[in-house]
Each structure stands twice: as structure tokens, then as C-alpha cells.
Amino acid sequence: MNIQHKNVAFEDYKFPKALTGIEGLDELTNGGFPQGRPTLICGSAGCGKTLMAMEFLIRGITQYNEPGVFIAFEETAEDLTKNVASLGFDLDDLVSKKILKIDYIHVERSEIEETGEYDLEGLFIRGYAIDSIGAKRIVLDTIESLFSGLDNQAVLRSEIRRLFRWLKDKGVTAVITGERGDQTLTKQGLEVYVSDCVILLDHRIINQISTRRLRIVKYRGTVHGTNEYPFLIDKDGISVLPITSLDLDFDVSNEIVSTGVQGMDEMLGTGGFYKGSSVLITGTAGTAKTTFVSSFANEICKSGKRCIFFAFEESEKQLLRNMKQVGIDLEPHIKNGLLRIQASRPSLNGLEMHLLQIHKHIKEFSPDAII
């Protein structure tokens, strides 16, 4: 095992795991996918199965020094390369370095002669793919293509079970993607054969807003998050926000942060807010809520600290103009990198997606104060 799991704060699992490198998913799975065992990622078309499997492979290569093999039954290597290029994944570079191998297998019914000795292992692995690059991870995407191309499903299922046993013997962590059925997780009931870890992805429309959800249906032998969790696909790949895993175990500070309004500091009796506290400023329209928090942002930045301002009603330029009219000039703080204004319409995403994007911006900017 190449990964030094001791550096990761996931210590209560009872068998080795392979970190996915996907933000939030390692927290939910308490350390990643089961190492050397198959994991099933299932869901309807367009829910992100292929992307999650590909990102698991790429993060393994680039972050954990674990070469990988991607076996595709629907998309060619060229199509896959183009599809993930917008996320910053350069598959051609990884292939040229011989740490990634992509093999496209076209299953054509007329070209396959099914017999009792039908060897699916040779069809999948092509004998050399894993050994040629010392692969530690493999993706099979999507396995339904085999079922649709072959009639003798009894033979095929027997071969799939044999294939998974062979992969376990090779010590390869496998991810298999599958299309969701009407009444089952997959059309062919693959969860029966891939039962160490099963992840269900869902893409739904709620009140005309697109929402993506993830649920860990099963994870044998380990503690894991059991609820539905929102996930986001953007330029950085996939991010999962484990909202319900957040607990109330955190440190507190006695440090006082000024509100930016001298009279308010005096009224509070402490000279401001406790660092790390959450403060709600409420009032009807026109009661200077935005002006008050802008004064707070100005004070934070004047003290040399960083502040991020999430605005859902005004654009950045409108906010800067309006605040300048009342003597609060925030523009210099933006220019020197201490203030970031992130403006977006409330109707752009659902509540959970807004929260997920806020989480990503906070992690990227590392602010001392948030509005």
C-alpha cells in the first residue's frame, strides 16, 4: 500500500482504504473506497458516474502515486479526454507518462460467440493493462454495456464474479459504474456482486432548480455517512458537502473583533464580537443592514485581515458604489487582496448548492471574517 494513511484523520476503519481525493467524499466514507475491493457507483444517465470514477482514478495517480486503468465500454479514449479536459484533467499527459492506461472495448453482439468457456477476464483486462503500468486502481465504465450485448446472462454473471475475484487477487481497487434500474439500484442487480461499497448518485430538478445528491447505500465493515448529501460538479471536479456530519465540537476564543461601529462596540460592552462567533443582523428594508456589515468588512481589512462578502441582492460594482456614498470605500481592500465580494443570484442554485459553493470559496480564500 503506497498511501500513508496515518497522515489522514480517518483512524477507526478496520481494513485498508484507498483515498478518493474527492473533496468531502473521503470524510463521508471515513477514509475512501475499500482498498483491493470493488465499489459500485450507480445512478441514472447524466448523474456524474463516469466523472466520479475518472476523478477517483486521476486523484489516485496525481495525489497518491497509484497508477490506474480505465476500461470504457461506451466512450472512446478521445471522447473521455475531451470531456474531462474542462476540469483541468490532462489524460494524454498521464498516458504518455505510463501511469494511466485507457482501453476502449466495443461490445458488438455479432462479434461475440458465447460458449460455456466464455472468458470475460480477457475481454476486460486484455492481459497486460494492469501489469504494464503497475496499476493499483481500475475503473469499468459502464458494465451494463456487456449485458446489453450478450444473451447468456448466467454465463456473464459467473464471469463477472470470477473477474472480481481475480481483481481482488491482484490487489487492485476497482470502481464499477452501473445504470440505475426501475426498482433496483442497477438494471441487472449488480449490487449483489459488488457489495463492499455501493454509492448512489441522483440528479433531480426541484422547483426548476438542478440538484445533485449522493448517498452511500452500503459500505461493509465501516462507519459511514448514511444520509443524502449534495454534491457539485464544477471546474475543479466533484465536491461533496457532508452537511449532517458537522458536529458541535470546536474551540472557542476570547479574542474580541470590532464591529467597525464605535457606538455598537460600546453598546455590546465587550468592544465587539467574539472571534469565531455567528452574528445575525436583521431588520426591514432600508434599516442599514448592508451598511453595517460593510463597516465590519472595512474594519477587518483595515486591520490587515481577510474578509469574504457573499452578496445575493447587489452586484459587486453596485455594492462598492453604494457604500462609497456613505463614506465606506471597500475598493482598496479588493485591490490589495484582503476583500473578496462573491455576488450571485439567490435563484441561481438551490440552498444546498449555495452552501456548497460558499464552502468552496471559503476554503480557497481562507478568510478571517465572512459576511
Image (tube, grey):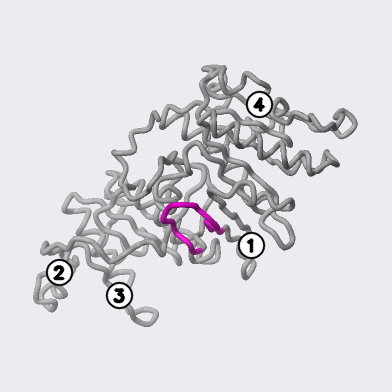
Asked if residue 222 lies in the magenta stretch, the reply is yes
- Image quadrant for the N terminus? top left
Residue 71 screen position, x and y as percent: 65, 31
Mark identifier at residue 204: 1
Asked if residue 177 lies in the magenta stretch, the reply is no
Query: Depth check: 135 or 97 in front?
Result: 135
Disc 4 to disc 1: CB gap under 8 Å: no
Above or below: residue 223 compared with residue 313: above
Q: Residue beneath label 2, please?
A: 272
Q: Mark 4 vs mark 1: which is more N-terminal?
A: 4
Q: Residue beneath label 4, please?
A: 125
**Residue type at the position of mark 3:** Ile
Q: Is mark 2 on a helix, strand or loop?
A: loop
Above or below: residue 302 compared with residue 88: below
Residue 68 screen position, x and y as percent: 54, 28
Q: Residue beneath label 3, please?
A: 281
Query: Depth check: 231 or 144 in front?
Result: 144
Query: Depth check: 252 or 156 in front?
Result: 156
